[in-house]
């Protein structure tokens, strides 16, 4: 079966074009497609992108049976974040890592200098089963790489002799091929006509892919699947915004113009152009055009900075493209020829295929400091740092699908002369200096005189500082006269000048020349004006001529400057007068004059010295307004600009209390008002400002007063009208939905006439409440109202009433809104307080009248108070004569509304009348009586009957709530004489007085006699014994808790509570309880110091017993709740159950304690649920 062609890994193999049989072309394409998988696609099985991680790959080899063989793979980890993972596989799936042993051995090493991992796999004493295809895979996070190699075993033995050798038990792990039946090889058929495998695969089912690949010799199933996936045509999604999108990329020569076009569905929609994610603004560089539904972006004079990714954004849709700027491109399509300066930082050549080898003039390029290779998807870029003349040559890139080449030409950069050397005329013993300046400060050169190189010496000095080269000759002599030349090294350039030696001839003819001042101030920019930066030194050398030597006088205004020493001085020589100011100050500014005189005449020159300095700091920095995260800062310009115009300002801010200042702008800001952004709402800030002129930056201004970025609130909501009169209007509203950190300080109400925009404030000071009555309004006008919320940030947006309000009294019928409890009879007990609030409505204000039982209410103990919207009836202490029907009426003119209120004051009833025992039979007695005369102003609800025998005189209840005025008393004891009493009852309770029966009931004895058995008293004495112990507890600090136990003892035991073996005593923090032997110690709000060991001791005359527990107090938690309730049920013996919540932290179900007490046994048990 033919094998797929492998990419060449050596230089000599790469130089030759790949050539193989046509039967392997499909497999070559498959491998190429495998290399060209886009970044966003992953290989089947979820593997990461294939990258060139291998520095050295294992090579296929032929080995003799019984010999050892070792395969080496090296991986470059310089670009990896973690250690790569290496797998050695045989065939497709067999992982050799699980077969490591005597036969297969693995080894790895790491070189820290080169950051290269070395992996070795050794097969000891190769057997026939080791023959076949192998693969090694390296993976690291999102990167992976793999390579294949073949092992051929020679000198094989007979098929039956497998599992031979000295490898031991591992010898047969891979030797499974010997078990197969050996068959004669069939003669290879003649090559058939070409078949397009991909057309067969496209129409085949996925389950047939492996069989077809086997038939046509394709071994890379993963690459096969990737190529099939890429061959599937995907219908492009139609765009809702674009009719035609941008091209995939644009190419333009440097300095040329390029245009990008899109067509839109909607011709009126706005578009944005972005470059590398940043919006482009229209300028001379970038021109936007809009013609119908066509939008065009034009880039003029393209340069390397325009080589970027561009986007056209319409709403939420985007169209992407890339612009490639070419420096110089030849006529051919494949090669790229670049002409660059040797001083260029880096050049790059890009290819859009998946390369496997890069070469220059037949030599393979390596990744080092000179060459870098960048990969972006299918784009591979070769970067040459610091290109030089040596980098000229032909560059090749080889892929498994072909090759491409490009020639690089590097041209020398032209050297620019910024200042040439000038001819000099110098007298004897003076100094001559040649100076020149070139564009490159790295250029060195040589000085020549008349073609002979000048060597430095005592008189001749050469210097090179930055871009300036100097040749200085001290004490010039006649032999120094000649032509001097400076030649930059490496450039075909020379700068020449002549040095003329001037001989001084002394004439003995006396002559007189009038004095002359040779003053040159042309370099200062203004005639006879010298500008000096404050703090710098000013030295003005003025050449003086005249014969005889003139006298020089310097003056500032009318003051003569005669000092020869000091900060301001005059230095005079024969033909030169120098005016010197050391460390110029502002006071040195002014008008200066120089006067020279000799017998032949006089000369005078005026000049102005201007001192410039950094400006004074800006003044009065203040905050004019704040927003949610912004603040508007303004300031006054400095009083003194330093003698130079103010260019702008620099701003800084800091949080109050902090010492760290943050710059707000790096470019000078020209205005005196600045909006600071990206601040934190609710935090105090301070600002300061620097002024900038041509000299420098001023000192900082004083800090502004602290200010806080706070946004105004949103507008108030639900503004409505509550009431309107002839001159007032009552409004109410709801607070703003968004308040913010500034809160709401109050509300301002404004009004204006309908159709006008002149809003009038109704209140000067903000009101706190959400209601307000606007007064002094014009009657009959239609007015609009609005409300704004105020806080430290200012006014909120107004909430305006949508409809106007007519200011006039609205007629409203009177109506009483009687509360629900007053619609029925209102019953109160004697002595209680009565306070009835009854609202009503009506406009204008109605007249309110009260009547009782149809008569005017004149009782002074009944108070009446009436407001605009309700009336109140109150009685401090109700009496029975206050009962009756109260009538309330509200009246406006002839309109009236009434309501009746029935008030009933009740009291306890009197006693029943004439209680008699009407009949006695057996153990029963019949009673009858008459209702009381005074029922307490309400109905009698029942009677309570009690009995008492003559012996004990103890009263026991026979019946409660007996409704009839008669009853029968049963279960009377034989032989006793009983008397009875009766209480009457109403809603106030039982009567204070009682009615006794006028006669008694005697229960006669029978002939039976009862003999009582002798009573034997049981001895209940016992020593104390705890039936329920104390339990360890964990409680939360600050929340009251309790610990409990149960004890049994007779006689009653003395209980002693102790903490850490110390008697607690009468500490108010602890409450000790004893309920029928159930002992409880309540601890009020325990703290950390209340933890420890608690014990309870019970002592009586028969002995003592003690129990203890540990109490742990933890940090503050959920409030501990304690509940207790008692449940009793009637059975043969009475049982008392106490359910107590031991503790509850707020998480999970609470813990309850159930205690059951048996009074007759004095025992207790506890069951926790």
Image: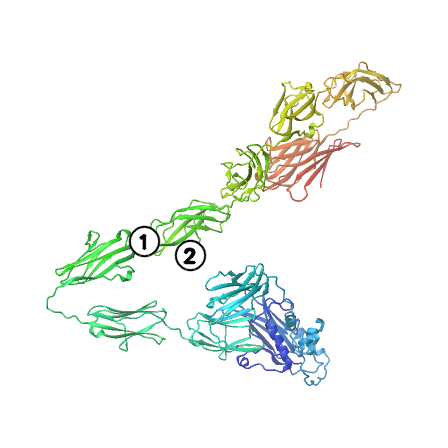
Q: Residues within 10 Å of mark 2 (few under 14, many from 20)?
A: few
Quadrant containing the C terminus is top right
**Can residue 339 be seen?**
yes
Examine the rendered structure and indicate whether residue 394 appears above or below residue 603.
below
- Taking depth in this image into account, of 338 and 469 the one nearest to the observer is 338
Name the N-terminal-most of marks 1 and 2: 1
| Mark 1 surroundings: few (<14), some (14-19) or many (≥20) residues within 10 A | many
Disc ID at residue 643: 1
Which quadrant would residue 807 be assigned to in this image? top right
Q: Is residue 378 above or below residue 914?
A: below
| Residue 685 on image: x %, y % | 46, 47
Task: Write down the quadrant of residue 837 in the picture.
Answer: top right
In the image, 614 versus 844, the foreground residue is 844
Q: Is residue 125 visible?
A: no
Q: Quick check: 488 left or right of 269?
A: left
Select label 1 or label 2 by which is in front.
Answer: 1
* Helix, strand or loop at mark 1: loop
Q: Position of residue 669 (x, y in %)?
A: 41, 54
Q: Can you give x and y, in whole percent of width and height, for residue 1096 in the image?
A: 65, 35
Q: Quadrant of the N terminus?
A: bottom right
Number of callouts: 2
User: Circle 2 sits in a helix, a strand or a loop, which is it?
Assistant: loop
The quadrant where residue 997 appears: top right
Query: Which residue ends up furthest to the top in the rendered image?
Result: 998
505 with respect to 618 (left or right): left
The residue beneath circle 2 is 667
Of residues 910 and 727, the one nearer the viewer is 727
Tell me where residue 619 appears, x and y as whole percent.
Answer: 38, 47
């Amino acid at each position: 079966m033919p094998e797929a062609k492998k990419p060449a890994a050596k230089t000599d193999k790469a130089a030759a074009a790949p050539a193989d049989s046509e039967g392997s072309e499909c497999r070559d394409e498959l491998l190429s497609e495998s290399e060209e998988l886009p970044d966003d696609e992953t290989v089947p099985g979820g593997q990461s992108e294939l990258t060139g991680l291998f520095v050295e790959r294992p090579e296929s080899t032929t080995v003799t049976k019984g010999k050892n063989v070792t395969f080496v793979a090296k991986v470059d980890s310089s670009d990896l974040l973690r250690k790569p993972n290496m797998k050695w596989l045989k065939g497709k799936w067999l992982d050799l890592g699980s077969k490591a042993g005597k036969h297969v051995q693995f080894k790895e090493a790491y070189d820290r200098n080169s950051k290269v991992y070395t992996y070795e796999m050794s097969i000891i004493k190769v057997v026939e089963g080791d023959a076949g295809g192998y693969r090694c895979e390296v993976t690291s996070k999102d990167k992976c790489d793999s390579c294949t190699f073949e092992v051929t075993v020679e000198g094989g033995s007979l098929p039956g002799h497998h599992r031979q050798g000295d490898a031991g038990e591992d010898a047969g792990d891979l030797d499974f091929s010997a078990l197969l039946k050996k068959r004669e090889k069939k003669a290879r058929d003649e090559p058939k006509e070409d078949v397009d495998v991909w057309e067969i695969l496209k129409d085949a089912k996925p389950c047939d892919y492996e069989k077809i690949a086997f038939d046509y010799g394709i071994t890379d199933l993963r690459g096969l699947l990737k190529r099939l996936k890429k061959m599937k045509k995907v219908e492009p999604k139609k765009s809702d915004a674009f009719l035609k999108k941008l091209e995939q990329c644009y190419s333009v020569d440097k300095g040329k113009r390029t245009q990008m076009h899109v067509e839109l569905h909607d011709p009126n929609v706005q578009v944005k152009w972005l470059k590398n994610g940043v919006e482009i603004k229209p300028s001379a560089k970038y021109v936007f055009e809009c013609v119908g539904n066509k939008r065009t972006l034009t880039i003029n004079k393209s340069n390397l900075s325009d080589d970027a990714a561009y986007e056209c954004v319409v709403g939420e849709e985007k169209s992407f493209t890339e612009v490639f700027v070419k420096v110089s491109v030849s006529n051919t399509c494949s090669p790229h020829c670049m002409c660059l300066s040797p001083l260029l930082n880096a050049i790059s050549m890009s290819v859009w295929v998946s390369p496997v080898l890069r070469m220059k003039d037949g030599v393979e390029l390596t990744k080092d400091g000179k060459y870098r290779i960048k990969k972006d998807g299918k784009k591979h870029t070769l970067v040459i740092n610091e290109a030089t003349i040596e980098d000229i040559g032909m560059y090749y890139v080889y892929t498994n699908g072909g090759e491409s080449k490009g020639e690089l030409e590097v041209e020398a950069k032209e050297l620019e002369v910024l200042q040439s050397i000038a001819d000099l005329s110098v007298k004897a013993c003076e100094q001559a200096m040649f100076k020149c300046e070139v564009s490159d400060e790295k250029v060195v050169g040589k000085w020549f005189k008349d073609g002979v190189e000048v060597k430095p010496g005592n008189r001749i000095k050469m210097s090179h500082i930055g871009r300036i080269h100097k040749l200085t000759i001290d004490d010039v002599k006649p032999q120094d006269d000649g032509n001097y030349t400076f030649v930059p090294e490496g450039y075909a350039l020379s700068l020449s000048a002549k040095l003329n030696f001037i001989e001084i001839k002394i004439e003995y003819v006396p002559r007189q020349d009038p004095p002359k001042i040779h003053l040159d101030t042309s370099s200062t920019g203004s005639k006879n004006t010298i500008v000096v930066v404050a703090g710098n030194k000013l030295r003005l050398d003025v050449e003086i001529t005249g014969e005889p030597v003139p006298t020089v006088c310097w003056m500032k205004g009318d003051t003569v400057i005669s000092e020869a020493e000091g900060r301001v001085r005059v230095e005079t020589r024969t033909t030169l007068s120098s005016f010197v100011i050391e460390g110029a100050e502002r006071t040195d500014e002014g008008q200066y004059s120089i006067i020279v005189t000799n017998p032949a005449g006089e000369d005078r020159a005026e000049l102005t010295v201007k001192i410039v300095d950094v400006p004074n700091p800006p003044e009065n920095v203040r905050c004019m307004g704040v927003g949610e995260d912004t603040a508007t800062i303004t300031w006054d310009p400095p009083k003194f600009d330093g003698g130079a115009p103010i260019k702008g300002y620099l701003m800084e801010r800091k949080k109050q209390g902090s010492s760290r200042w943050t710059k707000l702008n790096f470019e000078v800001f020209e205005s005196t008002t600045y909006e600071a952004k990206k601040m934190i709402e609710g935090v105090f800030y301070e600002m300061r400002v620097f002024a900038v002129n041509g000299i420098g930056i001023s000192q900082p201004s004083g800090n502004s007063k602290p200010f806080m970025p706070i946004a105004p609130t949103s507008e108030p909501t639900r503004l409505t009208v509550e009431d309107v009169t002839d001159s007032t209007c009552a409004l109410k509203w709801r607070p703003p939905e968004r308040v913010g950190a500034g809160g709401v300080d109050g509300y301002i109400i404004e009004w204006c006439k309908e159709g006008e925009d002149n809003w009038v404030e109704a209140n000067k000071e903000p009101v706190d409440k959400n209601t307000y009555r606007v007064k002094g309004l014009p009657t009959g006008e239609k007015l609009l109202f609005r409300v704004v919320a105020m806080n430290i940030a200012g006014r909120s947006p107004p909430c305006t009433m949508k409809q106007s309000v007519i200011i006039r009294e609205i007629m409203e019928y009177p109506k009483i809104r009687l509360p629900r409890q007053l619609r029925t009879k209102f019953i109160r007990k004697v002595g209680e307080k009565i306070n009835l609030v009854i609202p009503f409505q009506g406009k204008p204000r109605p007249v309110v009248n009260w009547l009782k039982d149809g008569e005017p209410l004149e009782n002074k103990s009944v108070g009446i108070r009436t407001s605009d919207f309700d009336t109140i009836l109150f009685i401090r202490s109700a009496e029975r004569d206050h009962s009756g029907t109260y009538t309330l009426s509200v009246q406006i003119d002839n309109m009236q509304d009434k309501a009746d209120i029935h008030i009933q004051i009740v009291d306890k009833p009197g006693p029943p009348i004439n209680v008699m025992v009407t009949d006695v039979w057996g153990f029963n007695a019949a009673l009858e009586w008459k209702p009381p005369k005074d029922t307490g102003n309400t109905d009698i609800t029942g009677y309570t009957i009690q009995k008492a025998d003559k012996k004990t005189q103890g009263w026991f209840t026979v019946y409660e709530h007996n409704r009839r005025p008669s009853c029968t008393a049963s279960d009377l004891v034989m032989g006793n004489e009983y008397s009875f009493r009766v209480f009457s009852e109403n809603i106030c309770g039982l009567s204070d007085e009682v009615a006794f029966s006028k006669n008694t009931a005697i229960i006669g004895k029978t002939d039976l006699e009862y003999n009582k058995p002798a009573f034997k008293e049981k001895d209940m004495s016992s020593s104390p014994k705890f039936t329920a112990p104390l339990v360890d507890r964990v409680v939360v600090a600050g929340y009251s808790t309790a610990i409990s136990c149960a004890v049994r003892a007779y006689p009653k035991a003395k209980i002693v509570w102790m903490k850490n073996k110390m008697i607690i005593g009468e500490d108010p923090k602890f409450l000790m309880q004893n309920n029928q032997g159930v002992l409880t110690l309540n601890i009020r709000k325990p703290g950390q110091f209340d933890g420890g060991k608690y014990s309870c001791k019970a002592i009586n005359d028969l002995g003592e017993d003690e129990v203890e527990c540990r109490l742990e107090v933890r940090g503050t938690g959920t409030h501990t709740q304690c509940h207790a309730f008692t449940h009793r049920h009637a059975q043969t013996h009475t049982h008392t159950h106490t359910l107590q919540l031991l503790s509850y932290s707020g998480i999970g179900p609470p813990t309850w304690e159930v205690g059951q007490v048996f009074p007759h046994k004095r025992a207790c048990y506890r069951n926790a649920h």
